[in-house]
Amino acid sequence: MKENRPIIALDFASRTEVQTFLEQFPSQEKLFVKVGMELYYAEGPDIIHYLKDCGHSIFLDLKLHDIPNTVESAMRVLAKLGVDMTNVHAAGGVEMMQAARRGLGEDAILIAVTQLTSTSEEQMRKDQNIQTSLQDAVVHYAQKAQEAGLDGVVCSAHEVKLIKEATNPEFVCLTPGIRPSGGEIGDQKRVMTPADAARIGSDYIVVGRPITKSEDPYQTYLSIKEEWNRG
Ligand code: C5P
């Protein structure tokens, strides 16, 4: 189901930086933000409490990958924090993903990373000894995530159609690598505009630097949101 707010990646090193950034938004504007490893490991659960107190929705992007028992216990802790969405690596296997679901419960959205978008097909073959195409590997992991009872996957916007066909239309596809029309692409390789991501069926888009590095983050956020909802 499509979320009308773009998720803002809070790729900052400290709570102070986050606060300075968020002060540029009206306090009544309730955002959907992504907290990644850097910020979470620096600030711990307090950063989640702070963002929740501000009224924002939270995707905690920690990409868990460990034995099922450990992941289940860790997810129980994240459920208590009250995050709205979190994730695991599908490479941990169906049992690990099922354990993650048990630990987290049904209230938060649980998605899986299939293959990292930084992994090329050649690297996957050499490093992981998976001898299929990258696309087949991504689709396979998406199906395993579905089998384990997860809500969806993180994927490239270019893979959404294939994944929805291989799972079902309600299976969530969350897509980073989004760049507004005419914007700089930075180190992202395969980018898509918010409007195109909407057209091909993304349910959530994650946008970082185009908003965090903008001279006017709030206006940039609003225009990306408008483009996403128009698409
Ligand atoms: O700044 P930018 O819009 O490229 O940020 C995208 C965010 O999404 C970053 O936090 C990045 O780590 C994350 N991400 C990604 N590609 C993935 C998974 C996560 O860009 N496959």
Image (cartoon, rainbow, N blue to C red):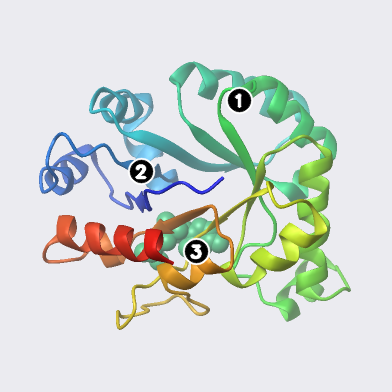
Q: Is residue 213 above or below residue 74?
A: below
Mark toward the viewer: 2 or 1? 2
**As drawn, is 53 to the left or to the right of 4?**
left
Residue 44 visible at all? yes
Badge number at residue 61: none
**As drawn, is 22 to the left or to the right of 115?**
left
* Crowd around label 3: few <14 · some 14–19 · many ≥20 (10 Å): many
Badge number at residue 75: 1
Badge number at residue 198: 3
What's the amino acid at mark 2? Val
Q: Are marks 3 and 1 in contact (CB under 8 Å)?
A: no
Q: Is residue 157 above or below residue 6?
A: below
Residue 118: x and y in percent read 58, 70
In the picture, the quarter occupied by the N terminus is: top right
Residue on which the image places disc 2: 33
Q: Is residue 119 above or below residue 49?
A: below
**As drawn, is 70 to the left or to the right of 191?**
right
Mark toward the viewer: 3 or 1? 3
Q: Quadrant of residue 35?
A: top left
The answer for how far apart the CA atoms under marks 3 and 1 are is 30 Å
The answer for how far apart the CA atoms under marks 2 and 1 are is 19 Å
What's the amino acid at mark 3? Ala
Q: Residue at x 64, y 20 (%)?
A: 105
